[in-house]
Image (cartoon, helix red, strand yellow):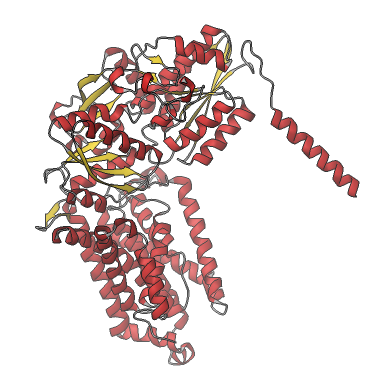
Amino acid sequence: MFNQRKLLHGIVAGLGLMVAAGPLSAAEGLSDGKVKIGVLSDMSGVYKSLEGPGAVVAAKMAVEDFGGKVLDKPIEIVSADHQNKPDIGASTAREWIDAKQVDMITALDNSSVALAVQGLASEKKVITMDTGAGTTALTEDQCTPYGIHYVYDTHALPVGTATAMVKNGGKKWFFITADYAFGHSLQENTSAVVKSLDGEVVGNVNAPLGTTDFSSYLLQAQSSGADVIGLANAGQDTVNAIKQANQFRIVQSGQKLAGMLVFITDIQSMGLDIAQGLQFTTAFVWNQDDEAETWSRRYYEKQGAMPTMVQAGVYSAVTNYLKAIEAVGSDDPDAVRKQLGEMELNDMFVKGGKILPNGLMLHDMYLVEAKKPDESKEDWDLLKVISKIPAEQAYIPLSESKCSLLK
Amino acid sequence: MSMQVILAQALLGLNVGVFYAMLSLGLAVIFGLLNIINFAHGAMYMLGAFVALIGYSLLDDWFGISLQIGFWASLIVAPLFVGILGMIIERTMLKRLYELDHIYGLLLTFGITLILQGLFSNYFNISGTPYPGQPESLSGVVNLSFMYFPTYRLFAIVFSIVVCFATWFVIEHTRLGSRLRAGVENPTLTQAFGLNVPLMITLTFGFGCALAGLAGVLAAPIYSVSPLMGADLIIVVFAVVVIGGMGSIMGAILTGLALGLVEGITKVVYPPAASTVIFFLMVLVLLFRPAGLFGKER
């Protein structure tokens, strides 16, 4: 009996080791006969409409447009819901990498999830192309050799929006901040911009992610005497805050709202009556040029909504990843990452984009404004571009980066 | 800190307070008359909101019934639905536990809560679905001189207070109420007078649940409808009941309103304490007046 148990232990331990060792990857060609791309996003919560299922549609479009194959091997898309929980995100990523041989992970909205997954993936030499998260930590103090930050970050957002607002007389700011990595990072970076222009931050309040009643936070902001209420949050949180600010007549009483991260889906959900005049920074507007519009209308056919900047970013990221594999003739992460760093990215999403050694995808951003209802020509015609923010101005220059890979 | 700010936050506090009051009232009625700690009360509140949401926007998609139950109709339909469900739960399950310790009823109702929450999390997103059916007539804004206040919230405050005091009046000052109370005080004797005590108990439980459902409908347009909306609230509501005194009807109403106010004003004085001030008060009350502010020592 006793011996039998020992034997059993031995077998279990042996099996465990086999699993832990994992498959040995080949350097040449494709490691497992196919390229697998994971779309890890918030599929059910506050960020569902800005990334979520739409990101899966965009990734599938990219694969389809690429011909479904790279180096004559099939491309497969897998997807999962991280529920805005870093532990769930990390364990899904671990399962994808260890058991399902996923080669690249994209989407990754929610900064806390993104940081967890990027760290884990890089340890296992898997490229992440983050389109959804905002925190600059991804390419700054927590940068990794395989982590790429693709669409926007919390440095680029305030550069356009906060600068424009301060210059129009909005000197005193109060922040309503989403209480996690992203919100704090956004508030910090926006404060820096405001202060650099001789503005002042008069206070802030932290609201949990997924707050439905912003009324008391808004009243705190109102009584602070600030000129501008900065919303350092995103998705449904921003929509709720702006709608309720309208209910409590905050804007009509003379204060301005600054949505630091606003997506076109948010504007659509609020309606132009409420959103009109709201200025914010974005990486992509679906009708910014013909190429973008053609692609976006195809996306609309499949998803029933126009793409947000991060959904368009997923298409661009997946396409360029596949191009890099084709160029080097292998899915070896080191070779592909090197190739991505050398390519100039040009497609419907980005013009003249470059991926820096710290993982930052350097590209132009746009300051946009929500149209007045009578300016809108069709259902999703919601935004007009006020100005272009050159890439060098929007993002942290390489010379000032705190990324340890650069030292 | 101006008076204006305090008044504004106090009014918002009252807005939260009416929900505390309605929920703790239902809990107090159920505890006072049935001696059951109904942990499923939060789930009933959540259910009320979902009945309103489904009735307004999903009947056609889900059941192929081309019918839309508007907000006003929901104020009747949702409490009825939740009340009937409550009665079914009482008849089929809770009834068997009356002879046992309180803790059994608590565990059963807690289990029911988990099942209902799980069921709804499966079909609806956790962070909430906005309720689209707020009536046009209540969508405006009222200028209260110290602040602008959405008409709907004002309506919710007034409506809830009326419902709370009507309930108190019925239980304390009508024949029906006196029979109920008699049934609780001495069931055997009351039954000897020809009153159907078990039926009264079932109806009371159903009524308590219906109150929670009604609160859910009222909450739907203000907060988004989410599977966890009840779980977030129920812990605070239990604290309210403990402070007010288990089983005291008027105590539950007044404490609910007062604690909403206290919470609102704390947001002005020291915002970080706003979410804990009620529990701090609960500790104080338990130390100095264990039966609660309005409760009687038994």
Is A126 situated above or below B125?
Answer: above
Residue at image position (23%, 19%) is A388
Residue at coordinates 51% horizontally, 13% vertically from top-left?
Answer: A338
Residue lying furthest front in this view? Answer: A407
Residue at figure coordinates x 38%, y 83% from the top left = B180
The N terminus of chain B, quarter of image: bottom left
Left/right of residue A13 with respect to residue B270 in the rendered view: right
Quarter of the rendering containing residue A234: top left
The furthest residue to the left: B145
One can see residue B79 in this view = no
Residue at 39 percent of width and 80 percent of height: B288
Classify A344 as above or below A7. Answer: above
Specify whether residue A109 is in view: yes
- Percent position (x, y) of residue A35? 57, 18
Point out residue B284 in the picture as x, y percentages from the top left corner. Answer: 38, 74
Q: Which of A124 and A48 lies nearest the eye of the viewer?
A: A124
Question: Which of the 4 image quarters holds residue B246?
Answer: bottom left
A344 versus A141 height, above or below: above
Q: Nearer the viewer, residue A282 or B111?
A: A282
What is the tally of numbered marks visible in this picture?
0
The residue lying toward the viewer, choosing from A50 and B283, is: B283
Instruction: Pick the residue in front: A363 or A319.
Output: A363
Q: Position of residue A278 (x, y in %)?
A: 19, 33
Q: Position of residue A79 (x, y in %)?
A: 51, 30
Q: Quadrant of the C terminus of chain B?
A: bottom left
